[in-house]
DNA sequence: AGTAAATGCGCG
DNA sequence: AAAGCGCGCATTTACT
């Protein structure tokens, strides 16, 4: 813990102050690094949320600082000083949440983030503590000086008192610019501490390098955006809303209650003689799709009709309001620019919001059809990793039989699950369409997620005895799977007892902790987290192949991209190579490529 | 009135 | 001995 005694906060609002700032910038300092931050706001009268979007809001302050001194520069009046300073400065630049700053500079300035010498203390914090909040305020209280939060509180009170927002507070209001300037100092203090764990030769060096490279690429994807067919989206939205409204009214007219209220729906169904057998986590009678589907099999004709209508209504509502509505409201000139957290999940997976492009329905093409290439000269191509988690699991388990079956499948171009099925059932004629393949997948993914045989049977929709037989056969044929799981859990338990926390380290050295009462989840974390890092490494390879400008969106183990119409086939081959990993694993981590497509939905 | 929790459902 | 992992979004209901 350090403290903030003696720090200096400055405001650039004159030629003299500007000269002092430029002179200060030339001084020597630890790491020769500076921190950069921005304050942004909505345009007066516009929605508050605009303050966070470089396409809707405006830059208000840009701040530069080191461990002891911070400068706030009002953007409208003194941007020139910032450009001059950045023209001279060639040392490391540290930000807290660099993606935010980089987007604003990209959209609203003629300065671009020099990623090759840039750092992010939020990424460092999330690697060091995957479960902690990355918020600067909290990190400052924990690592630097709890008093720093007070300045923020003063500012919050002043904003309220004066009726100001982030868009209307005067840039020369001292608590505002001082708060901004202090953030650079706090960022640099965090950097000093975190560098001890993330810098070259330190435990998290490889993980940090991978994350910074990923952040650069993914930020470019956010800026690229995804082109939306607005006419189609509007037409579908209108159709679907018209349908849902009509059905809801029918429910009211027929049953005098709302079929979109689950409580009321359960009452209606029971009134018709239905028996509810499913329950929610809190013990209430459930109106889930599974329950309703069961009623469609067992119920009276009237129950069946209602069940059918409810499921159709839910589907239409989901498509209209979760997808098409957001495409229409979120787009900027026909492109949606999603927000991607590159360390969104505790395992190191990414998560995407506004809109949630990782959750588009894949059962049919209705929603994905709305995603177009960026212009007429391009087409869409996509590339998916092949069973990446299972392949990593096989590789880590070092089970020779499992590994050789993957190699056999790859050599003959067949399906790994089918090869395993032939082995398990002793039936070399088994085909991919065989129903028993589902049980094989159930056992594999059940184990990857830590499910018991009962749950595996439930998911696969077969009797438990049948699933247990398959599971037992797995243990006999591939004993390495269970022994690997046991080993991971044993290490986790030992660490929990010795260090107070169970955890695994992925292949880059990243540390992934579990909840104390769920040590069994570590197997999944190791696989899921390791696969996320493999995928991120593939993004780096795509970047090194100069394909970043074509990238659209990452979906866990899939990348979607534009390809020049005339060179789609060459690009497919290049992408396939970048998405394939053969070094470092006993089973090749292969990838498939699809396209050329006129829209994302053509694949479905 | 605004926030949180519960519920349900979309994805890998 | 047994344990389904990780997310985001919309709506309804419960609570302050």
Image (cartoon, coloured by chain):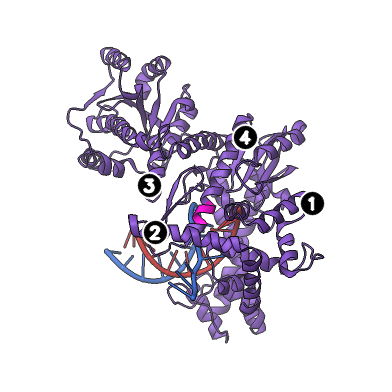
Chain colours: A purple, B red, C blue
Residue A542: mark: 4
**Chain hosting mark 4:** A
Q: Main secondary structure of the magenta part?
A: helix
Looking at the picture, do discs 1 and 4 lie on one chain? yes
The residue tagged 1 is: A412
Q: Residues within 10 Å of mark 3 (few under 14, many from 20)?
A: some
User: Where's residue A552, x and y in %?
Assistant: 61, 39
Residue A129: mark: 3
> Distance of mark 2 from mark 3, alpha carbons?
20 Å
Q: Earlier in the sequence, mark 2 or mark 3?
A: 3
Q: In the image shown, does A177 or A453 lie closer to the viewer?
A: A453
Q: Which residues are magenta?
A: A524-528
**Chain hosting mark 3:** A
Instruction: State which mark lies toward you, 4 or 3.
Output: 3
Instruction: State which mark lies toward you, 2 or 4.
Output: 2
> Distance of mark 2 from mark 4, alpha carbons?
39 Å
**Chain hosting mark 1:** A
> Distance of mark 4 from mark 3, alpha carbons?
29 Å
> Distance of mark 1 from mark 4, alpha carbons?
27 Å
Left or right of A596? Residue A186 is left
Residue A202 appears in view: yes
Q: Secondary structure at mark 4?
A: helix
Cβ atoms at labels 1 and 2 below 8 Å apart:
no
Q: In the image shown, does A314 or A105 lie closer to the viewer?
A: A105
Residue A335 appears in view: no
Q: Earlier in the sequence, mark 1 or mark 4?
A: 1
Residue A156: mark: none
Instruction: State which mark lies toward you, 2 or 3.
Output: 2
């Amino acid at each position: 813990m350090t403290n903030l005694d003696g720090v200096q906060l400055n405001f650039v609002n004159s030629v003299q102050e500007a000269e002092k700032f430029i002179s200060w910038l030339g001084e020597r300092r630890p790491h020769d690094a500076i921190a950069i931050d921005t304050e942004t706001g909505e345009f007066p009268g516009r929605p508050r949320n605009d303050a966070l979007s470089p396409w809707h809001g405006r830059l208000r302050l840009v701040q530069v600082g080191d461990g002891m001194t911070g400068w706030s520069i009002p953007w409208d009046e003194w941007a020139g000083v910032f450009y001059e300073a950045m023209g001279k400065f060639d040392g490391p630049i540290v930000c807290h949440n660099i993606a935010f700053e980089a987007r604003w500079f990209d959209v609203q300035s003629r300065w671009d983030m020099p990623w090759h010498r840039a750092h992010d203390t939020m990424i460092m914090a999330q690697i060091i503590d995957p479960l902690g909040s990355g918020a600067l305020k909290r990190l400052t209280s924990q690592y630097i000086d709890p008093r720093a939060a007070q300045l923020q509180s003063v500012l919050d009170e002043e904003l309220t008192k004066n009726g100001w927002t982030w868009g209307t507070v005067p840039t020369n209001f001292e608590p505002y610019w001082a708060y901004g300037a202090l953030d650079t100092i706090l960022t640099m203090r965090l950097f000093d501490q975190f560098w001890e764990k993330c810098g070259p030769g330190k435990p998290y060096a490889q993980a940090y390098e991978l994350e910074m490279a990923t952040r650069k690429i993914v930020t470019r994807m956010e800026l690229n955006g995804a082109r939306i067919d607005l006419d189609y989206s509007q037409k579908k939205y209108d159709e679907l809303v018209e349908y849902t409204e009509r059905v809801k009214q029918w429910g009211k007219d027929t049953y005098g209650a709302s079929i979109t209220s689950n409580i009321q729906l359960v009452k209606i169904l029971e009134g018709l003689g239905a028996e509810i057998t499913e329950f929610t986590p809190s013990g209430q009678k459930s109106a889930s799709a599974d329950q309703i589907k069961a009623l469609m099999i067992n119920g009276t004709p009237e129950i069946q009709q209602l069940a059918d209508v409810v499921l159709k209504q839910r589907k239409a509502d989901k498509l209209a309001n979760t997808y098409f509505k957001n495409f229409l409201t979120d787009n900027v000139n026909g492109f949606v620019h999603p927000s991607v957290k590159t360390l969104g999940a505790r395992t190191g997976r990414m998560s995407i919001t506004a809109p949630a492009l990782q959750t588009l329905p894949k059962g049919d093409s209705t929603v994905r059809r709305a995603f177009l290439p960026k212009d007429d000269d391009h087409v869409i191509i996509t590339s998916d990793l092949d069973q990446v988690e299972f392949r990593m699991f096989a590789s880590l388990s070092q089970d020779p039989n499992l590994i050789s079956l993957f190699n056999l499948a790859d050599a003959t171009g067949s399906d790994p699950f089918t090869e395993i099925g032939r082995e398990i059932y002793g039936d070399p004629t088994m085909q991919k369409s065989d129903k028993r393949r589902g049980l094989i997948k159930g056992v594999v993914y059940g184990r990857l997620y830590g499910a018991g045989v009962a749950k595996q049977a439930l998911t696969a929709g077969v009797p438990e005895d049948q699933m247990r037989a398959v599971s037992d056969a797995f243990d006999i044929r591939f004993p390495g799977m269970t022994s690997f799981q046991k080993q991971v859990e044993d290490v986790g338990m030992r660490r929990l007892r010795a260090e107070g926390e169970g955890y695994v380290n992925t292949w880059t050295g990243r540390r992934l902790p579990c909840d104390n009462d769920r040590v069994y989840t570590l197997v999944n974390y190791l696989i899921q987290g390791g696969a996320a890092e493999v995928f991120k490494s593939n993004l780096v390879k795509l970047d090194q192949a100069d394909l970043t400008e074509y990238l659209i969106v990452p979906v866990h183990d899939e990348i979607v991209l534009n390809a020049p119409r005339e060179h789609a086939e060459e690009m497919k081959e290049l992408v396939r190579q970048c998405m394939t990993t053969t070094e470092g694993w006993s089973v090749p981590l292969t990838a498939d490529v699809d396209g050329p497509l006129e829209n994302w939905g053509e694949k479905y």
